[in-house]
Image (cartoon, rainbow, N blue to C red):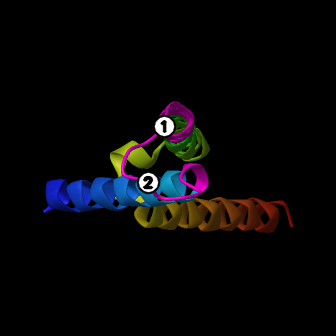
Amino acid sequence: VRAEVQQQGLQELTQAVQEKCFNKCITRPQERLDSKQQQCLSLCIERYIDTMKVVSASMMQRGQRVRSFHHVSHPGVGRYRDVSSFRARKRHDRKATRARRRLRLLAWA
């Protein structure tokens, strides 16, 4: 299913690039493309490919930063099933700490 979705997305992108570049480069339809039209189409498509590479690399870097941030901000999550159980454990620990402090204060009184 994922491969089909990726293939469909690639086909849609290809079609969009073809339409945009065609509309930009072909001002008057002819039987054959002249050299300027061919060059314009080639450069337009290359620009889209280069742009997609930059966007893809940027998205991958962003994904890696998010994953590393998640790991750093919740270093103990690995022992738990998910972040919510990790947070529940932290709340429990805070409550227990407060209770111990209250007991110490009562012992001093």
| Disc 2 + disc 1, Cβ < 8 Å | yes
Kindly identify the residue that appears in the image at 28 percent across and 57 percent down.
Answer: 11
**Figure quadrant of residue 69:** top right
Residue that numbered label 1 is attached to: 34
Q: Residue 49 or 88: which is nearer the viewer?
A: 49
Q: Give how far across and how far down residue 101 sits, in percent.
A: 74, 60
Judge the density around disc 2: few (<14), some (14-19), many (≥20) Cα neighbours within 10 Å: few
Q: CA distance from mark 2 to mark 1?
A: 9 Å
Quadrant location of the N terminus in the rendered image: bottom left
Residue 107 shown left or right of residue 24 in the figure: right
Q: Amino acid at mark 1?
A: Asp
Does the segment drawn in magenta span residue 32? Answer: yes
Crowdedness of circle 1 by 10 Å Cα count: few (<14), some, many (20+)? few
Magenta-span inclusion, residue 56: no
Q: Against 33, is 50 above or below?
A: above
Q: Which residue is mark 2?
A: 30
Total label count?
A: 2
Residue drawn at x 45%, y 67% as measured from the top left: 84
Observer-nearest of 26 and 98: 26
Along the viewing direction, whichever of 79 and 8 lies nearer the viewer: 8
Rendered location of residue 102, percent (x, y)? 74, 67
Given the current orientation, which residue lies at the most extreme front position? 31
Residue type at mark 2 is Gln
Q: Which residues are magenta?
A: 24-53
Q: Please state the horizontal and vertical placement of residue 104, each as a whole percent of the image.
A: 75, 59
Q: Main secondary structure of the magenta part?
A: helix
* Secondary element at image label 2: loop
